[in-house]
Amino acid sequence: MNIKKLVLALSCASLMAVVQAADTDRHYPAPSTVSEQMAALVNAPAPALWYSDPKTLQDWEQMAGSYAKAAGEAASKTAADRGVKVESSKLAGVPVFTLTPKKIDENKKDKVIFYIHGGGYVLGHGISGITEAIPMAAQNHYKVISVDYRMAPQHDPKTFEIFQKIVEQYGEEDNPFAAYKEVVKQYGAENIAVFGTSTGGAMTLILGLQAHTEGRQMMPAALIAGTPWADLDKIGDSYVVNEGVDNVLGTYDHLIRAAAQVYANGHDLKDPLISPVYASDSILKDFPPTLLVSGTRDLFLSNTVRMHTRLLANRAPAELIVYEAVSHAQYYFDTNAPETRQHYQFLDDFLARVWKQK
């Protein structure tokens, strides 16, 4: 994805916001250990978006709409440029996008990637949410199903408790897990890997929790949780040491805090269905192979490390990649960067190992 388009997407979304400048005293230049393309990302100024403080529903809607327009246009162009066919439909009443590459490898024709986008539970609706999924299809030659789940705060987060209470209260049509169950019917859980970054990384882990409650036959073959928002509270070392260093998120204290509040809506932030790092040992010990990804400058590095430690403590098969100099999710921002191509190769290699063992 063109970095200029990404920056535009992030910047346009924040025009309505009250903006606080990033702490430039903590914005360090890119080290010599990264490529020229990655250095451009690392050296870029922090976008105003994550320093915004939306107060009203109108503020949230304007921000989300601006982001969706800019990021959606960029995602559509990237998919077309890379030969990925994007089709919209519904599974169990849930909107999804199916991404089909020009070529699907023979050993992957019975496999599918179930993708959950990020965006702090408030950004990324519609086609704007498929950006990270495009290279999984284009480079790794998988079919990808991306779920277009409902955003807070336009919808009461109580209706958005992703994997459990929503079905009881509001029906299957608002529940991403319902879409997942439809994919299980088509492919079998053993042929599905679940994948997402940031909020999508947390939701990937939460899906593992919910799948466990329905029985092992529902557990996907693998989970890939990129820099997961595993604890919605401001807990962890990297919230302090990487504040202002991370030139994507910047700080917890503005949009991230606001998003946590409107999403949780008074719920206990230590509820594992909100913050999966607090999941019980009895569930985590049964987790499938899980790959976690972060970067040395990532504000969510501690979220990622803490989640990895919880899995290892329960002897779950977990792997961790921490990329040099990378801020939050920067590892997929520019598909021309060698680090990004290598990242998707690592994902492909991980999945190949998982399915070879089955």
Image (cartoon, rainbow, N blue to C red):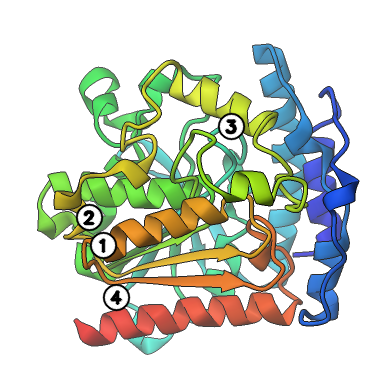
Q: Which residue is mark 1?
A: 313
Q: What is the quadrant of residue 327 in the picture? A: bottom right
Kindly report the distance in space between the C-alpha atoms of the residues bearing marks 2 and 4. 27 Å
Asked if residue 214 shows in the view, the reply is: yes
In which quadrant of the rendered image does the C terminus lie? bottom left
Marks 1 & 2, CB-CB < 8 Å contact: yes
Occupied quadrant, residue 256: top right
What's the mark number on residue 214? none
Q: Residues within 10 Å of mark 4 (few under 14, many from 20)?
A: some
Question: Which residue position holds label 3?
Answer: 122
At numbered mark 1, what does the secondary structure look like: helix, strand or loop? helix
Q: Give the residue type that dot 4 points to.
A: Asp
Query: Which of pointers 3 and 4 lies earlier in the amino acid sequence?
Result: 4
Nearest to N terminus: mark 3 or mark 2: 3
Q: Which residue is mark 2?
A: 284
Q: CA distance from mark 1 to mark 4?
A: 33 Å
Q: Secondary structure at mark 4?
A: loop
Question: Which is more foreground, mark 3 or mark 4?
Answer: 3
Indicate the amino acid at tag 3. Answer: Val
Residue to which mark 4 is pinned = 110
